[in-house]
Amino acid sequence: MRRAVLLCTMALLAVASGPAQPRKLKVYISADMEGIGGVSTWQIQAGSQGREYEKFRRLMTQEVNAAIAGAFDAGATEVLVSDSHGDGQNIDVELLDPRARLVRAWPRPLIMMQGVDSTFDAVAFVGYHASEGQPAAILAHTMSSRRIFEIKLNDTVVPEAAFNAAIAGEFSVPVVFLSGDQTIGEEARRLLGPIETAAVKQASGFFSATMMHPEGAQRLIRTGVKRGVERRGELKPYKLAHPVKLEITFKDTVNAELVSYLPGVERPRGNAVVFTARDTLEAAKFLEAVMNLNAF
Ligand SMILES: [Zn+2]
């Protein structure tokens, strides 16, 4: 039905002002590093001091380029990428596909989704990882591996993929694709529905996985993103009921104690706080502030 309305509008525009402009198709790509093919530890690949970091930031850029290519294969006219790992400055700007624009560095109010809005048509996650506490999940954590054990939104444990999907959901934009290990793929499909996933590695523990060649991973990502963007009409945005209850369980109790001094913050357990946000965008800003305070 929406399509018919659009065609009518375009027909009217064509009559009024000559040939219609081609329709825009905007794709947002949020890229992390733990779920890039070949990455198994922070110490060697995913930390900026690591022995193989320079190689793996290049491979991260190539996986992002594969996703960009898949989006354009499906008819995208614009792609925005957010570098959402570590210090937010991993993607090699010279090697990035020049058709895309890039969000870098922190802090930023929408964290791993900075720049997404209602003008976008689809979201893809590249290099993602599962939430902490699962037996076979590479480098599993949620937002801060140092400070946070678990995040719940409206009483559901969410991996970063679902938190970020809920941000896109505020703008009615569906997530259509995710790449990472097999565990985050399963977690994402359970929460977000039948999105396209690419398991670029089979995790056997927290640090170990069976890898495929980078070219194979990039092929899977390109075809998966293309299929996902083509299927965007049948995939539902991940929308949460308002207000949004954000529950953060910290690794250290003193962090929960300090955050609980803020007005409006509850402390249901010694190591957890609850903040009731107007929506996921407000929850994201609260979380970004809490994660970036250096006092604790
Ligand atoms: Zn990361």
Image (cartoon, rainbow, N blue to C red):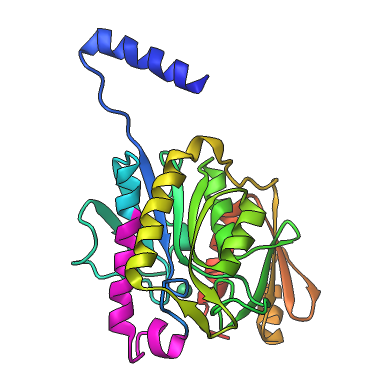
What is the x, y in percent for residue 261?
Answer: 70, 75
Q: Is residue 218 left or right of residue 165?
A: left
Position of residue 39 relative to residue 121, above or below, is below
Which one is in front, 89 or 122?
122
Q: How would you classify the magenta stretch by its main secondary structure?
A: helix
State the image quarter where residue 267 is shown. bottom right
> Which residue is located at x 23 percent, y 66 percent?
93
Q: State whether residue 115 appears in this view.
A: no
> Which residue is located at x 36 percent, y 69 percent?
105
Which one is in front, 212 or 116?
212
Position of residue 8 relative to residue 149, above or below, is above
State the image quarter where residue 222 is shown. bottom left
Q: State whether residue 213 appears in this view.
A: yes
What is the x, y in percent for residue 110?
Answer: 48, 58
What is the x, y in percent for residue 148?
Answer: 62, 78
Q: Is residue 275 left or right of residue 114?
A: right
> Which residue is located at x 62 percent, y 61 percent?
186
Question: Is residue 55 inside the magenta stretch?
Answer: yes
State the image quarter where residue 61 is shown. bottom left
Q: Is residue 233 left or right of residue 220?
A: right
> Which residue is located at x 55 percent, y 53 percent?
165
Residue at the farthest right position? 268
Q: Is residue 121 left or right of residue 104?
A: right
Position of residue 239 relative to residue 12, above or below, is below
Give the magenta range.
Answer: 41-67
Question: Is residue 219 inside the magenta stretch?
Answer: no
